[in-house]
Amino acid sequence: MKLNCDMGESFGSWTKGMDAEVMPYIDMANIACGFHASDPLTMDRTVRTAIAEKVAIGAHPGYPDLMGFGRRSMACSPAEVEDMMLYQIGALAGICQAEGTALSYVKPHGAMYNDMAANLELLEGAMRAVRAFDARLPLMVMATANPEPHRQLAEKMGVTLCLEPFAARAYEATGHLPSRRLPGAVHHDQATIVVQAVALAKGEALTARDGSALQLPCDTLCVHGDNPESVAAVRAIREAFTALESA
């Protein structure tokens, strides 16, 4: 089971995340592209760190919302989402090319990511962007209780999907993420996070917020490296996965 993590989200003199500390424990780095976070220097530095740790690089485009860290929905049309994604994917791809590497996938960020999970027209706009840039790049999207509409659209558009659940988030019965403003929406206890990660890797059901059993497909698992506690949780997940593989 591959672990992916949002990275390169510092901006100017503002620092977010512990990228260097978490990079050795992950397989895929979702690097911000300047709209919701990051800047050219941060993007380049994060790409070089990923290369050094042999971590796959993904573009992490979001809404143009530095003030809100891309977590606020915006009234964007599918065509606007398509062009925003093309702009950001192209920016990171240029840095990758200059550093002698290339993008491996695309994962939208924050509100854009959540909006696509609920709106097939926006998701189609994102798929058009990926197909136009490089149809070989997988598009990472939210794993939900009913992924078939997303899979059918991807097949129609000629795009490969990578379905992603989260180790540190609670879930609604539909498989969608509750608002971060709600109590318990984000897990902070390391043991809880590791148990959920292992259950997802083994294909076991989670318990949704309403108490129902929730089965989620899992091609890759999202983790976070925002603080020392998050990094410790990622390390514990990696150790648990290693133990599973050797069992």
Image (cartoon, rainbow, N blue to C red):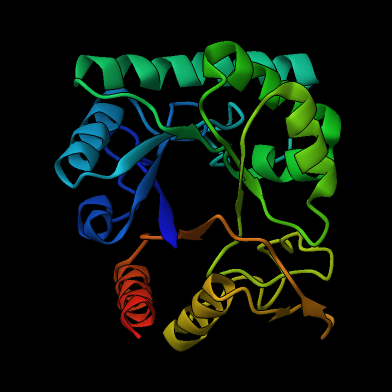
* Image location (x, y in percent) of residue 20: 20, 52
Q: Count the marks: how many?
A: 0
Please determine whether, in this image, residue 200 is positioned above or below residue 160.
Answer: below
Residue closer to the observer: 57 or 179: 57
* Image location (x, y in percent) of residue 168: 54, 70
The residue drawn where x is 54% and y is 13% is 133
Among the 4 quarters of the image, the one containing residue 47: top left
Please determine whether, in this image, residue 226 is positioned above or below residue 154.
Answer: below
Left or right? Give the position of 2 relative to 177.
left
Residue closer to the observer: 111 or 67: 111
The residue drawn where x is 82% and y is 37% is 152
Residue closer to the observer: 210 or 203: 203
The residue drawn where x is 55% and y is 34% is 138
Among the 4 quarters of the image, the one containing residue 80: top right
Q: Quadrant of the C terminus?
A: bottom left
Residue closer to the observer: 1 or 171: 1
Left or right? Give the position of 171 relative to 67.
right
Residue occupying the far left of the picture: 52
Among the 4 quarters of the image, the one containing residue 117: top right
Please determine whether, in this image, residue 67 is positioned above or below residue 180.
Answer: above
* Image location (x, y in percent) of residue 142: 67, 50
* Image location (x, y in percent) of residue 174: 84, 64
Left or right? Give the position of 191 relative to 78.
left
